[in-house]
Amino acid sequence: MSPLAFSDSLAALSAAPDECPSCHTVSHIARRLCLTCLLRAGAEETDNLESGEFERALDGVPMPDTNWRIGKYEILEEIGRGGMGVIYRARQRHSRRIVALKRILSYHADSQETLKRFRREAEAASSLDHPNILPIYEVDESDDGVPFFSMKFASGGSLHDVAPALRNDPREIVRLMAKVVRAVQYAHRQGILHRDLKPGNILLDGRGEPLVSDFGLAKWLDVSSDLTRTLTIFGTPGYIAPEQAVGRAAAITPAADVYSLGAILFDLLTGRPPFLGEHALAVIRQASEKTAPKLRSLGKGFDKDLETICARCLEREPTARYRSAADLAEDLERWLEGRPIIARPISPPVRLWRWSRRNPALAGSVAAALIIGGFAIGWQIQTRRLTRTVQEDILAARSVAVLPFLNLDTAQPDLEFAQSFANALRPKFAALGPARLNVVADSTVIIPSVGDLDNLRILNTRTGCQTVLWGTIRPFGSGWRVSARLSDVETGKSLFDCVKESLKPYPAREVAAATAQVLYDVLSDSHKAASAPADPALSDPAAHELLRAGDDLASHRTAVDIDRALACYQRAIELEPKSALARTSFVSETIARAQFGSGDSKLLDRATSLGREAVALSPQAAPTHRALAALFLYVRGDVAGAREESLRAVEVGTSGEGAALMGNVERARGRPDIALRWYSIAERWQGRPGGGVSAIGDAWAELAQDDRATEMYSRMAALHPELPEGWMGLCRLNLLEQNFSTARKFYQDNQKTYSQFPYTTQIAAQVEFFSRNFVEAEKLYRTMEQTDPGGGGSFYGAVDYESALGRIRLAAGDRTEALALLHRRLEVEKQPTQNSEMLYRLAAVESCLNEIAPALQYLRAAGDAGWVDYRSLALDPRFDSIRQDARFSRISEAMATRVASLRRRGQPLSDGQLTKTTNNER
Amino acid sequence: MGIQLTPFNHEAGKGPDFAALSLPHFCLEYIHAFPQLRPMLSNAAIDGAGEDDRFRTTRWSVVLLSADGMGDDEKAREALEHLCRNYWRPVVAFIAREGQPVQNAEDLAQEFFLQLLRRNFLQQATRERGRFRTLLRASVRNFLNDASSKTKSKKRGGDFEFVTWDEWKAEAPSQLSIPAEVLEGWSSEQVFDVRWAATVAERALRRLQDECEKRGRRRVFDVLSPYLTAERSDISNDALAQTLGVKSADVKNLLHRMRQRYRQLLRDEVAETVDAPEEVEDELRYLVKALAAGM
């Protein structure tokens, strides 16, 4: 069946049968529509619908299409979308010719420089004229000034699509690849490198002939190469040459494309790229550390010569590969013609070379031996090249790219500070010796997370610098606090970090003066970099064992085992009194313990003091700060304390967890607008989308931006169907919009399936309570008292069980029980606090007790402390006693006004970032 | 406040794979080669729109009438060409399944269509009656059995082309997907029928899309068409309503209308290839059966 099955004349072959759930047949067409069901629909007995009637129904939809034209092209459909660009199938208006049209997404078109660069590169690519290169017809710009280009529409799909059908036909594979390689060779002669060759970029025309696309342009359209926003690597892991992944832009030569061609050949023959890994970074690491597997190690029956050809392309050392695409093409053509190939299996000198690379101390003498021994001329040239590279490396080692600092107060990048800092450093460096300092003058760049090699390397590619200087800045007390960090882009290793406080506003010069010498020292010799001492509990076997036992117990997630885990950590602390790690573990599990009931106050006090000790013992460790922050935020309700510790965590170590925690802190103090920025930073620092989608939804819901919240919750439901947050969010939105029946349907449809999450019952109870279906609400709250005793209160709407039940009993006329419940709750709640949620709960209880004045007073205080959920307030039956009061309306209106103003403030930054992530999901 | 203890513990979901931006597959049919058909390009009749009396004058019945000596030969020829143009994929698929590489299959198909239109296909039609599909399928089989046609194909159609492959495929990409193992078990005739079924459905969908596009509501098609065949319980009307900016109840109505309209278009499509309206149902049942066979 082989090659015939990949033409669109017949069918694409799907690897695994994909049964239609309703008819159990397996043939599909576009949009995964089941073919059988589509035909059966025609046999159904229904009334016919004439076109006029259908058109009238369509006209009822309020939003007509827009933007279906770009330049002189009529857009037919979107056929691909990447991080920065989008591809359409389009029709040229006059010639009626069908083309593929690519353009930059308009929200990336904010910089003239970007647009110019895109246009320049598209024009360069359009000059290529070769039968196996996808022709670019026209480079132009649309009415809004955004450049685009049109090119031949390749109807045969890509090598990626036909790979399964080609698998058992090495001759056809080599025939295709020889053409591809000749096309790449032609482009190289024109001085254009491809940089992202992969099966998906090699398209096929209607007759199955290959057309290489996107010469030098891939980064504009590939999702993985979106430089300023996602800070990852150009090229596609699996096909990218190791030096390209690691490297300096200047070091990329035609050999990088040769590597990719070899990787494609390897993939087509074996069904997998040479290196596999759980994530991009693992793949790239393998490619730069390991020798590619031999073809025949993956299965018998592979041709020995093809094995040699692949291996030669996939050499880690660029100079050990085919010298040019032409040489590779020559060998492929020789193979096709049955002539002996030129490449030989790895020869002894290459092995020696490899060996010396692994033993850098010996490299010099080996190189010398090679020259003295009179090896081939090529080796001498290579050695000279090596010497030059070494010198370049030394210079490059003293080059620093300064990134915009992150302003922690606003969660926005601060380019100005970076510039002042660099300006202050330059003269000081100049006095010490040669060095180069480049500011990445792009305020959309967000600093990377610690140890994030992908992002550091991209910066390296972009700036050619070997190290990156970055940090944070924020107002602190009556002065400022600045953290700075110098990282090696090759290893991700932190060479230097510090936190400085200053009373001077914007203390760029002070920080530069204090750090210049030590910065220059580590630049000249990275061995001078101080490394953080290991935690003592890790070097003490007994303590270490206790920590591991504790972690194991804690993972069981039951109250009993968490208590046992706490005991283990306690013993570890006794064994190693200076261990911050053991203390941090204790604090983390105390937070987990609090989920099973409020816990005794002694435990909380103990955890708090251990947390403070941990921070003092190990101020440079982000997890100690995060644990203490989480304790403050989730258990003690101390938002200000939580904020300070979260900020410190981010100062000493940028991580996704830290940013997410900051988002939660900002929401707790009534700043969902800033929270959104933190969440979007968290997504970047985690290096993957999807983690905090429901939290982003919550923040949008707090800003009463329900459409965006809906989008996020729907995305959550799609990405994480195993978690209830998606449908719960949608349920709550409907509740807030007072669509009670829809809200009810959401929980009725879903709640049973998610019974392992006890808090799902809370949303159900809240729907019934807020819609005043008290009988059902009471049942649900009573159930929860049994199933989730620790829950309630800090859930959406801050409805605890006792006050809700008290309010319901009051409505039933059962005053005795109602008052007992409410007074019991008052005891719990009545404590001095600045926490908006606690104040809000207190106001609710007072209101139920008909204590008008205190109720209003606490409610106002809650609003002042940042409570913004005025829509829950409007529905919550606990506030009925004060609802008619004019002061209540004023407080509620003030909350709504505040939300509106936050919404205006929140929008601009979040827009680009969040839109991008959603678009990617499509 | 909705602060949960474990907001970021979730394993991140993976987005779709955008690395491989391969090209798309949709359905739109378009005539290019025959000069006498060009004027029809701008003519709505090409897609059957506005043919209220379509059952009396389906393309296939026009062909048959003429074959019976009762119709207009020129019109019959046009109708036949139109049908061939719509249903070239099953022919290529059949030939490919017979063991020809795709390029050869396409060349042979080219040759086949030219012969079909040049020879007196209509005579054959009279003798055998039947549906366009069965007749076309039998004709391809005969064509392949004819040894001389095979050698002739080496000349690759001469200077006169019926099909301009690249443009046709660009105009009407198709996206049929079948598991390899299932395809393996099908005969050439079955492959032909399945490919035919896909063409019928893709054409009906394409026309539905065109109708939406004409009213400036292409978005409605994009959003709702994946649910044309879904069970009601699978659909979140609320989410769709949000996307389209209409009320939840309107989604239900709109989807219902779209299904009705699709059904109509599908039946119109099938009607073009059969002799009489009462055969539409039977033809659909046949195609459904063909899809289920061999599984």
Image: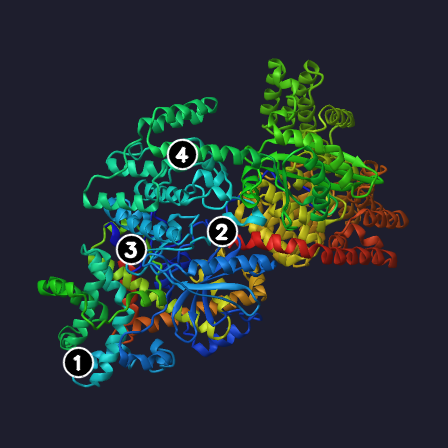
| Res A482 quadrant in image | top right
- Per the image, label 3 sits on a secondary structure element best described as helix
Residue located 26% across and 67% down the image: B88
The residue carrying pointer 1 sits among few (fewer than 14), some (14 to 19) or many (20 or more) residues within 10 Å by Cα, namely many
Lateral position of residue A569 relative to residue B154, left or right: right
Indicate the amino acid at tag 4. Answer: Gln
Nearer to us: label 2 or label 1: 2
- Per the image, label 4 sits on a secondary structure element best described as helix
Residue topped by disc 1: B67
- Per the image, label 1 sits on a secondary structure element best described as helix
Q: Residue A1: give x, y in percent of width and height.
A: 23, 50
- Give the CA distance from mark 3 to mark 1: 34 Å
Same chain under badges 2 and 4? The reply is yes
Lateral position of residue A140 relative to residue A440, left or right: left
**Residue A592 visible in the current orientation:** no
Chain bearing tag 2 is: A
Which numbered marker is on residue A219? 2
| Res A127 quadrant in image | bottom left
Name the residue nearer the viewer: A378 or A50: A378
Check the image and report above or below for B40 versus A336: below
Residue topped by disc 3: B292
- Give the CA distance from mark 2 to mark 4: 30 Å
- Direction right: furthest residue: A853
